[in-house]
Image (spheres, rainbow, N blue to C red):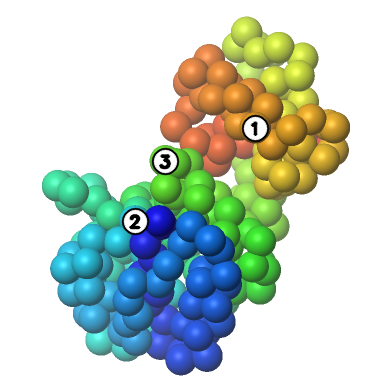
Amino acid sequence: MIRVLVADDQAMVRTGFGMIIGAQPDMAVVGEAADGVAAVELARRLRPDVVLLDIRMPRLDGLEALRLLAGPGVAEPIRVVVVTTFDLDEYVHTALSNGACGFLLKDSGPALLVEAVRAAVSGDALISPSITVRLLEHLSSPAPAYDDAGLSPRELDVVRLVARGLTNAEIAARLFIAVGTVKTHLASVQTKLPARNRVEIAAWAWERRLVG
């Protein structure tokens, strides 16, 4: 059972997320927090598998709460997925540097929220596709000499779709393969590049102008 803590200052949002998580047979909400201080205290006490954390909250903002739970120097970091209305680049960069395992917009939909929780548990990171594409499109460094890093043609197909912000399920449908096969390809890609997660895979693809 994946244990989830929901931290958001809006009761309706907490209720909505709770319904989405509760509808999954292998997930359960183990706690709710309406401000950053309570989120940190509950997370440290309950040790959930994943914390869904808003950015703008009273008493302590989400980015600072994130740093305390998963930032550099934290002995036993907790997996945190930031879920917010605000997709400012500054927030995204700060969240990722402070240890976030995902960054979603609140209008991303239930399926992506569930996938982000699963990705965090498996050690991956998921960012809302629109944010991923916008951030990586702005890479201004000149393209390096072509290097496929030993990736197979199919692995390159998967990498290009990751860089365009598609989820594993969407990639599987586009390439007519199973979701499990997509995960296998991604694991191989991470080893060959090397990359810690799909965000770094996407950055590698954009840097090499592999995405049209």
Residue reaching furthest to the top? 150
Residue 78 to residue 86: above or below: above
Whichever of callouts 2 and 1 sits on the residue coming sooner in the sequence is 2
- Residue 9's quadrant in the figure? bottom left
How crowded pointer 2 is (Cα within 10 Å; few <14, some 14-19, many 20+) is rated as: many
Kindly identify the amino acid type of the residue bearing the numbered disc 3: Gly
Residue nearest the viewer, comparing 31 with 203: 31
Q: Depth check: give the residue in front, 172 or 134.
A: 172
Vertical relation: 210 (above or below) 58: above
| Residue under numbered circle 2 | 49
Q: Mark 3: few, some, or many residues within 10 Å (few <14, many ≥20)?
A: few
Specify whether 82 is left or right of 163: left
Q: Residue shown at 49%/77% (left/top)?
A: 18
> Which image quarter is the N terminus in?
bottom left
Count of number-bearing discs: 3
User: Which of labels 1 and 3 is toward the front?
Assistant: 1
Dot 3 corresponds to which residue? 123
Contact, CB < 8 Å: mark 1 with mark 3?
Answer: no
Residue 63: image location, x then y, percent: 35, 67
Corner quadrant of residue 158:
top right
Label 1 sits on residue: 180
What is the CA distance from the residue labelled 1 to the residue labelled 3? 16 Å
Does residue 136 appear in this view?
yes
Q: In the displayed image of the protein, which residue is found farthest to the front?
A: 25
Query: How far is the residue under mark 2 from the one under mark 3?
Result: 11 Å
48 vs 203, left or right, is left
**Image location (x, y in percent) of residue 21:** 52, 69
**Foreground: 131 or 190?**
190
Amino acid on which the number 2 mark rests in the picture = Asp
